[in-house]
Amino acid sequence: MPDNTSTGTTAGTGTGAGMASGPGNGGFGAGQSSSSNLAQTAQDYAGKVSEAASQAKDYVTDKVSVVGDKIKDLDFAQMTEDCKQYARQNPGQAMLISAGIGLLLGVLVRGRR
């Protein structure tokens, strides 16, 4: 039997330790390199998602405070009086709008059966 160590080839069932981990050679280190690249990519994406979530939270918080301020500024008593006045001036339209809103609410509340 020839000495395989002198020719640079290996035969048998070695553990693969010491093999180069280049593409296509099937060495033991190839799996480790690939999984470490995958883990690094996953960590990079996790950081990006975390940053985007933080920005979205800040944006929503700002918009909620703006909407809250607008609601506080509304005068519901004045709006009620305006609606009553409109209904007195345009009874037909007021009834159609009320019927449409009632139909829409009925469909939403009923849901799928």
Image: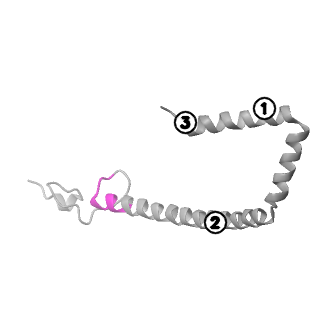
Spatial separation of the CA atoms under disc 2 and disc 1: 44 Å
Q: Is 86 one of the magenta-colored residues?
A: no
Q: Dot 1 corresponds to which residue?
A: 96
Looking at marks 3 and 2 on the same chain, the residue that comes earlier in the sequence is marked by 2
Q: Which residue is drawn at 65% across and 68% down?
A: 58
Q: Residue at x 60, y 34 (%)?
A: 107
Quarter occupied by residue 79? bottom right
Q: Which amino acid does label 3 sit on?
A: Arg
**Residue range of the region highlighted in magenta in the rendering:** 25-33
Image side of residue 68 versus residue 47, left or right: right
Give the Cα separation between the discs numbered 3 and 2: 38 Å
Classify mark 3: helix, strand or loop.
helix
- Where's residue 93, x and y in %? 84, 33
Tell me the residue that label 2 is attached to: 55
- Amino acid type at circle 1 is Leu
Task: From the top left corner, tell me how far across and down residue 61 is, in percent.
Answer: 66, 67
3D distance between C-alphas at marks 3 and 1? 21 Å
Q: Label 3 neighbourhood size at 10 Å, few (<14), some (14-19), many (20+)?
A: few
Label 3, on which residue? 110
Q: Which of marks 3 and 2 is in front?
A: 3
Magenta span: predominant SS is helix
Nearest to the eye among marks 2 and 1: give it. 1
Q: Which of marks 3 and 1 is nearer the N terminus?
A: 1
Mark 3 touches mark 2? (CB < 8 Å): no
